[in-house]
Amino acid sequence: MSISYGDKAVVTLRALVATIDGQFATVPPPVALRAAWDEMVQVLALGPAPELRTCPTCGGIGMRAATRCMRCWSSLPLLPPETAAAAAAPAHTP
Ligand SMILES: [Zn+2]
């Protein structure tokens, strides 16, 4: 079984998960709450955030794979495939 959400909902869910994880890091929750939360995050299966890049011309944010900026339309240099981003993504380990 898999659940899918719209892009906007996924962005919101990722932000919420990050916020709640941040709160849990500051104020450790009871074990049962922590376990339930971890299980819920697994069920959500949001995956890593999409890879983004900043336009060197206008500073706009766009997809990493894009060859043109969606904001100022200047052409963007190709970037090597990013593997560090996946490693840097927030992990949800108990
Ligand atoms: Zn731009």
Image (spheres, rainbow, N blue to C red):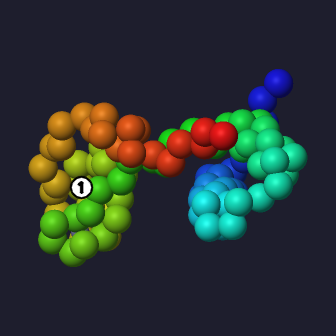
Please give left or right for residue 48 compared with residue 86 in the image: right
- The structure residue drawn at horizontal position 25% and vertical position 72%, both measured from the top left corner, is 59
Identify which residue, 25 or 85, lies in the foreground.
25
Examine the rendered structure and indicate whether residue 74 appears above or below residue 90.
below
Above or below, 74 against 3 in this view is: below
Q: Position of residue 39 (x, y in %)?
A: 78, 38
- Res 80 seen here: yes
> Residue 84 appears in which quarter of the rendering?
top left
Type of residue at label 1?
Arg
Q: In terms of depth relative to the viewer, which is nearer, 2 or 86?
A: 86
- Which percent across, then down, holds residue 92? 60, 43
Going 69% across and 67% down the picture, which residue do you hit?
A: 27
Residue 44 visible in the current orientation: no
Quadrant of the rendered image holding ligand 1:
bottom left
Position of residue 74 in the picture relative to residue 91 (left or right):
left
**Residue at the extreme right:** 32
Assign a secondary structure to mark 1.
loop
Quarter location, residue 20: bottom right
- In percent of the image, x 18 and y 43: which residue is there? 79
Percent across and percent down for residue 18 are 60, 59
Quarter containing the N terminus:
top right
Instruction: Find the residue positioned furthest to the top.
Output: 1
* Ligand 1 neighbours mark 1 (CB distance < 8 Å): no
Q: Position of residue 89 (x, y in %)?
A: 45, 46
List the residue tagged with mark 1: 68
Q: Which quadrant is home to the C terminus?
A: top right
Residue at 16% x, 56% y is 75
